[in-house]
Image (cartoon, helix red, strand yellow):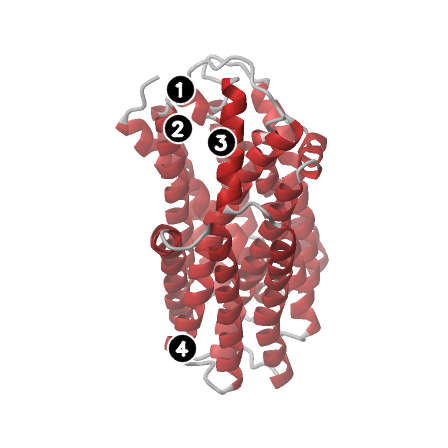
Amino acid sequence: MKLTRSQTAAFGIGAVGKDMVYALSASYVMYFYQDILGLSATFVGLILMIARVFDALNDPFMGILVAKTRTKWGRFRPWLLSGTVLNAFVLYALFAAPDMSKARLMVYFAVIYIVWGVTYTMMDIPYWSMIPAVTDTPKDRENLSVVGRTCAGIGSAVIQVGTLLAVAALGGGNERTGFGRIALIVAVLFVAAEIVCCAKVKEHDIGKMSTSTVGEMFKALFRNDQAMITVLAILMINGALYLTSNLVIYFFKYDFGGTGWMGNYTVFTTVGGACQILGMMLVYPLLHKKLGNTTIFKCALTMAMAGYGLILIVCFLGFSSNLILLCVCGALVFAANGILTVLTTVFLSSSVDYGQLKTGRREESVIFSMQTFVVKAASGIAVFITGIGLDAIGLVGDTSETGAVVAQSASTITGLRLLMTILPILGLTVAFVFFVKKFTLTDEKVQQIADTLHQQKEQ
């Protein structure tokens, strides 16, 4: 099964489209329904948490459905295409909510968002699962995975960088109208991207697929103490990142302020995204030549906490409107997060070998499935905390048609700064403490485990 350049490109185009959709929902649903439409932040956060945890639990069941599917078009593409079309319609409905009473809007949001999560899972699981059916060459599979992850990052970056400016331009100053129109554009691009992917990427019969239940995922995790520590780190690190991504838009609108806050927010997120990619592709490889992975991990956690601390200091020193200082501090946070993303994947991979040596079972698929489960759970918990926090500090959203920025009290601004920095620091501190005390898979030990497994295989 030879992988062609056109197939690789089409697979990458599919990743761009699907992560544009995910980024639009993950980054702006809270802001849209709380700040623009006026729903309680706690209620919005609760629905987001319930939906994302349900979505995480739903992943294995979707995997089972895909595994049992047999059609003349293949096992994966029918789900990929049908899920895409359904999700595109639901995405537009999510950001084009009709005028209705607040009670009805609450019901509308709860139903639409949960359906959005279900339909996104319909296409996301088969998208990544079809890699082994496209090519049986390990190198090609690795390249396809890299292309998919890289293009997914591009799709997410496009939304992070351009959405608010596009909303302002398309809505003529009305954010509600602007979000509806940008959602329509993204939905159309999404469908077009996945049509290209389905048309070009050809499946081959790979026989019966093995599946994992939620129970199997947790059993595999509990048998492996090093995997548990890694998963805890993933939970804390992603929770901190999602808190930041949900709150930073409020910071720029109400604390940084000014008529150009959207442009400044865009600059900050652009710098952050670039630093995150540089952290993965440049800083980590350079550090890896001189330091061990566990040392780099501790340094990156410290760097992220220092970045958050510096942001808080800059704000309380009266420089909350100094974009250069904020970008420098933010660069530390996002570059560190890029490094941590790479390392948690490395550690999870090492824990698979560790578990095999310890128990005699190699549970690669269930442990890596747990990574997706935990990331989604972290996202749900973080957005729920965001909602509670916004209501607790008394933030008043802009629900007027003009979108004029409402002045917030001094205590609200102080609370916003603390939410955006102290909570992530606490989460990263928990990750640091448990990692230092419990994680034992140094580079030397990982190599010893690999050598032992190799010797056992040859016996």
Counting residues from the start of the chain, the first of labels 2 and 4 encountered is 2
Q: Are marks 2 and 3 in contact (CB under 8 Å)?
A: no
- Closer to the N terminus: mark 1 or mark 4? 1
For disc 4, the marked residue is: 325
Q: Which residue is mark 2?
A: 141
Residue occupying image coordinates x 67% and y 58%: 384
Q: Residues within 10 Å of mark 1 (few under 14, many from 20)?
A: some
Q: Which mark is residue 451?
A: 3
> In the visual, does 155 lie left or right of 450?
left
- Position of the N terminus by quadrant: top left
Mark 1, residue position = 136
Check whether the beta carbons of the residues at disc 1 and disc 2 lie within 8 A of each other. yes
Q: Secondary structure at mark 4?
A: helix
Which mark sits nearer the N-terminus, 2 or 3? 2
- Residue type at numbered disc 3: Asp
User: Separation of disc 3 and disc 1 at Cα?
Assistant: 26 Å
Judge the density around disc 3: few (<14), some (14-19), many (≥20) Cα neighbours within 10 Å: few
| Pick the front one: 393 or 282 | 282
Taking depth in this image into account, of 379 and 364 the one nearest to the observer is 364
| Whole-number angstrom distance, CA of label 1 to CA of label 4 | 49 Å
Q: Nearer the viewer, mark 2 or mark 3?
A: 3
Classify 397 as above or below 453.
below
From the top left corner, tell me how far across and down residue 354 is, in percent.
59, 36
